[in-house]
Image: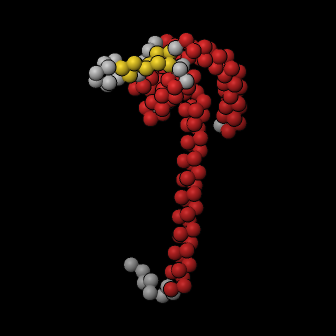
Amino acid sequence: MSDLSFISPEDIKAEEKRLYEEYKQKVNQLKKVQKENEAVGQVFTKGLLPIYVLHLLSLSPSNGNDLSNKIGERTGGLWIPSTGGIYPLLKKLEKQEFITGEWDDPKKKFKKIYKLTEKGRLEYLNKKLLLKPKIEESLKVFKIIYKDIY
């Protein structure tokens, strides 16, 4: 063990300050990475989740958990939206009258099954037309950026 008694109080303070600055820098880097991850996630949850939920409901009625699981299955586990993101979206779509929700057992209120309304079907078809060129364009941009980086 080395003898550290020769280190002055000023040196200790300087080292504490350096370590604290290094710590703040690392925390800021971690926060930046977290924000970037959240931003990438928002592309899916805010941009693609609403139309994908409408799409899945156009195929068959479903509940929130099943919708999340279906998305996970269809994407090979690459995207599994949380039910914390699905259920507020379902409430919003229901409020907009794009879907209706009915309890599988009205007395127990255990599972709410959502169905696409006619208004929701029209919204889905409209969004599908409007978003197709944007999604295609985004895919091209992602491929270019991916190619450039890797």
List x then y, in percent, for residue 39.
Answer: 59, 41
Vertical position of residue 60 compared to residue 137: above or below:
above
Place residue 83 in its image quadrant.
top left
Q: Inspect this view and state whether residue 134 appears.
A: yes
Number of labelled discs? 0
The location of residue 81, given as percent across then percent down, is 47, 31
The percent position of residue 65, horizontal first and vertical second, equals 40, 26
Q: Is residue 136 visible?
A: no
* Residue closer to the observer: 126 or 142: 126
Left or right, 128 with reference to 101 = right
The image shows residue 27 at horizontal and vertical percentages of 54, 58
Seen in the picture, residue 86 relative to 58 is either above or below; the reply is below
Q: Is residue 1 left or right of residue 126?
A: left
The quarter of the image holding the C terminus is: top right
> In percent of the image, x 58 and y 61: which residue is there?
25
Image quadrant occupied by the N terminus: bottom left
Query: Which residue sits at x=59%, y=51%?
Result: 32
Residue 41 appears in which quarter of the rendering? top right
- Quadrant of residue 87 in the image? top left
Q: Nearer the viewer, residue 88 or 48?
A: 88
